[in-house]
């Protein structure tokens, strides 16, 4: 468990982290999202005692990092995969870490195997690819067999196999009851990996909820309806202020309404319903809406971007060409 209590960091006039109060629970993967400069890395650095909070506290199992007797056995972190001396081999690097933290050296080969670096354990880290470097960083985080792991952008620069491996590892660690706290820019990746999401913008919490709840807040959640009387139903729905896309002869996608309301209006006009189903927005859409006001360095959205829906329907059907009613 990680608890943040009014955690604040100021750099001069700039408030990088603004009174964050959060509980990051064990047994789940918590995704930490936010635009560039939102304060994610600064928050993680304060949790690890690398930055001193201006106000508030970051607690690991009830204590600040500096008060932990064996910090690496409580919390393991990957913040910067390049923070390894290039002359060290994977094995000598991890052995030095184990020795200076009172961790049995026998753990070194175990974690090397866990992260799939056994064949290159004797090679110098300076010769490692980005992906191998990330794996070595993760091995370091796991060395103390900690209950809490924290990764800052762990899939940065990884190929699809590497991305999948990190995802499976995080899922496995949380299934063992550990606390997994991970920052990422990749919404689609978080949609597959995280159970819980914390979204911050300009240092403040914008959302802190299960992933399904965050997606449900999106205004672009829609209703799909198939009926032979699609044209007539569309006209009736338009009167109620709903927005309708006619995606096929018999098919409508309705936003700005509810599934109950669409069903009720179909009933009123006596339309036979062949399908009435919810279509959720993607996490990416929900995220873009949530953070629109807190993007520091964004370019203006292209015209019509807000209307373009990245629909994920319940049959996994591909997005189809939409024909405006
Ligand atoms: N040492 C520092 N001195 C001054 N300002 C800083 C310092 N470190 C961070 N900041 C500022 O604090 C804010 C938060 O930065 P931080 O790196 O925590 O954001 P982030 O969410 O991790 O961003 P990114 O996704 O780009 O890594 C930014 O505006 C940044 O410029």
Image (cartoon, grey):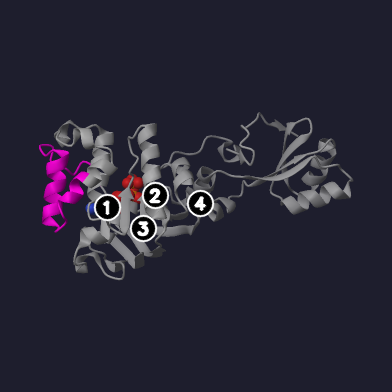
Of pointers 1 and 2, the one earlier in the residue sequence: 1
In the image, residue 287 lies in the stretch drawn in magenta: no
The image shows residue 243 at horizontal and vertical percentages of 71, 43
Badge 4 or badge 2: first in the primary sequence = 2
Q: Using residue 101 as the reference point, say whether residue 1 is left or right of it.
A: right
Q: How many marks?
A: 4
**Residue name at image x 16 percent, y 43 percent:** 84
- Which disc is residue 172 wearing? 2
Within 10 Å of disc 3 (Cα), the crowding (few <14, some 14-19, many 20+) is many
Asked whether the residues under the numbered discs 3 and 2 touch, taking CB atoms below 8 Å apart as contact, a structural biologist would say: no
| Nearer mark to the viewer, of 4 and 1 | 1
Real-space Cα separation, disc 4 to disc 3, in angstroms: 28 Å
| Few, some or many residues within 10 Å of mark 4 (<14, 14–19, 20+) | some
Give the Cα separation between the discs numbered 4 and 1.
28 Å
Instruction: Estimate the spatial distance between the alpha carbons at disc 1 and disc 3, rounded to whole Å.
Output: 13 Å
The vertical placement of 163 against 174, above or below, is: above
Helix, strand or loop at mark 4? helix
According to the image, label 4 marks what residue?
290
Quarter of the figure that contains the C terminus: top right
Q: Position of residue 277 (x, y in %)?
A: 71, 45
Q: Earlier in the sequence, mark 4 or mark 1?
A: 1
> Quick one: SS at disc 2?
helix
Residue 178: assigned label: 3
Q: Which residue is mark 1?
A: 77
Sequence-first tag of 4 and 3: 3
- SS label for mark 3: loop
The residue lying furthest to the right in this view is 270
Label 4 with label 2: CB-CB less than 8 Å: no
């Amino acid at each position: 468990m990680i608890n943040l209590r009014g955690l604040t960091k100021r750099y001069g006039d700039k408030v990088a982290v603004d009174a964050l109060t959060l509980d990051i629970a064990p047994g789940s993967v918590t995704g930490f999202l936010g635009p560039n400069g939102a304060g994610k890395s600064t928050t993680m650095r304060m949790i690890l005692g690398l930055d001193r909070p201006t106000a508030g506290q970051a607690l690991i199992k009830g204590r600040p990092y500096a008060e932990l007797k064996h910090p690496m056995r409580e919390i393991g972190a990957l913040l910067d995969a390049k923070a390894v001396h290039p002359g060290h081999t994977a094995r000598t690097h991890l052995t030095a870490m184990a020795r200076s933290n009172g961790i049995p050296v026998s753990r070194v080969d175990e974690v090397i195997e866990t992260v799939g670096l056994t064949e290159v354990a004797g090679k110098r880290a300076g010769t490692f690819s980005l992906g191998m470097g990330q794996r070595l960083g993760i091995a370091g985080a796991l060395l103390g067999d900690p209950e809490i792991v924290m990764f800052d952008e762990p899939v940065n620069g990884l190929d699809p196999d590497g991305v999948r491996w990190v995802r499976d590892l995080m899922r496995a660690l949380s299934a063992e009851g550990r606390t997994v706290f991970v920052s990422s820019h990749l919404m689609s990746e978080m949609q597959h990996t995280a159970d819980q999401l914390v979204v911050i913008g300009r240092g403040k919490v914008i959302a802190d909820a299960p992933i399904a709840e965050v997606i449900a807040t999106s205004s672009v959640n829609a209703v799909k309806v198939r009926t032979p009387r699609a044209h007539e139903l569309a006209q009736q729905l338009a009167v109620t202020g709903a927005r309708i896309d006619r995606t096929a002869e018999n098919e409508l996608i309705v936003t700005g309404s509810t599934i109950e309301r669409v069903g009720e209006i179909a009933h009123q006009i006596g339309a036979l319903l062949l399908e009435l189903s919810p279509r959720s927005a993607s996490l990416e859409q929900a995220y873009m809406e949530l953070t629109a006001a807190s993007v520091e360095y964004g370019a203006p959205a292209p015209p019509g971007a807000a209307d373009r829906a990245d629909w994920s329907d319940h049959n996994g059907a591909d997005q189809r060409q939409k024909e405006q009613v």
